[in-house]
Amino acid sequence: MSTVAATELLSSRVVDKETPIRRRHVLRAVFCGSCLTLAAIGFFTSNGLVTSAAFTVLPILGVLLWREGEPPVLLFACAFQWLQATAAIFYTNHFGQTLEEAFGSNELSVATWLSILAVVVLAVGIRCGFIGAGKPRRSELEFEASRMDIKKVTILYGLSFVGAALLHLIAWRFPSITQPLLAMAALKWGVVYLLCYTVMHQRQGYGILVVCLGLEFTMGLFGIFADFKSVFFVLVVAAMSSPLALRGRRLVVTVICFVILFTLGVVWTAV
């Protein structure tokens, strides 16, 4: 190989490596800029200061808990807690009321501030758990996912689905061990995540994934705790476990999941 050709090949590899990094920096800048813009706009709402604080917390959670290429389970959990802590803010803003006016005292406002602070403290505590964890293991996870046999994962999911269903049936007949049995049944979600991640990484077996989503959604409708949403939570976490999470099909999947969750949540609440 000539020197010129080798130089061009090396340059192309450098560009290929730098492009995703540059794209990630742009996406992070856009996300932080959007949150700060919303915080500035929120300052002029009925609950101005607390609304701005709520939007400012979001990029802080991302900085503390996002480990690129790894399942953002902890970030997702904190974001869900953030949504619960701030829901009253957006609800009262919609009707042009302050938290004090809606509740008749300042207790709701104090509780909201404390809840937002608690989410940040929780995120800081989780971040401390990352000390000594080393670099994100994106390459290792993607390598393992590329070697997975989707058919074997599907069989494992089928066994876990049946096993979890049986454990749910048995659990309520033995009150003294109900909680341990339900915890064992919840191990099924690890297999569901493995299936979702493997299918999306290998970009094949989407029919199997759709069947899995349909089964879990249908079975969840028979419960009283809105369990139908759990499979979509797992799908969102799996979709966001890749550096390609905010691009192409994965971005579409993530947005669709959030829309479905929001719609089903509203309908379920009405029911």
Image (cartoon, rainbow, N blue to C red):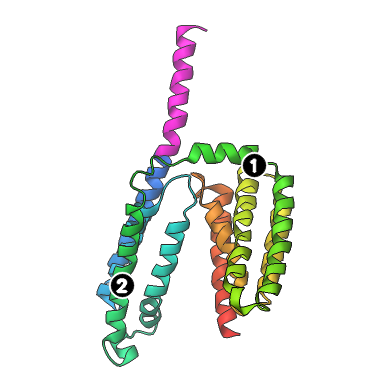
Q: Is residue 226 visible?
A: no
Quadrant of res 26: top left
Q: What is the magenta range? A: 1-21
Task: Decide: is 166 above or below 237.
Answer: below
Q: Read off the residue under disc 1.
A: 202
Image side of residue 145 versus residue 214, left or right: left
Q: Read off the residue under disc 2.
A: 51
In the image, farthest residue toward the bottom: 104
In this rendered view, identify the residue nearer to me: 245 or 44.
245
**Magenta-drawn stretch, dominant element (helix, strand or loop):** helix
Decide: few, some or many residues near mark 2? Use Cα within 10 Å; few <14, some 14-19, many ≥20: many
Residue 241 screen position, x and y as percent: 51, 49
Question: In this rendering, which labeled residue sits more in front, label 1 or label 2?
Answer: 1
Quadrant of res 186: bottom right
Q: Earlier in the sequence, mark 1 or mark 2?
A: 2
| 13 within the magenta span | yes
Image side of residue 3 versus residue 115, left or right: right
- Residue type, mark 2 in image: Thr
| 263 within the magenta span | no
> How many tags in the picture?
2
- Residue type, mark 1 in image: Gln
In this rendered view, identify the residue nearer to me: 271 or 228.
228
Dot 2 falls on a residue whose secondary structure is helix
Q: Residue at (27%, 91%) from the top-left corner?
A: 105
Residue 112 screen position, x and y as percent: 32, 77
Dot 1 falls on a residue whose secondary structure is helix
> How much space separates mark 1 and mark 2, taking CA atoms?
41 Å
Q: Is residue 230 visible?
A: yes
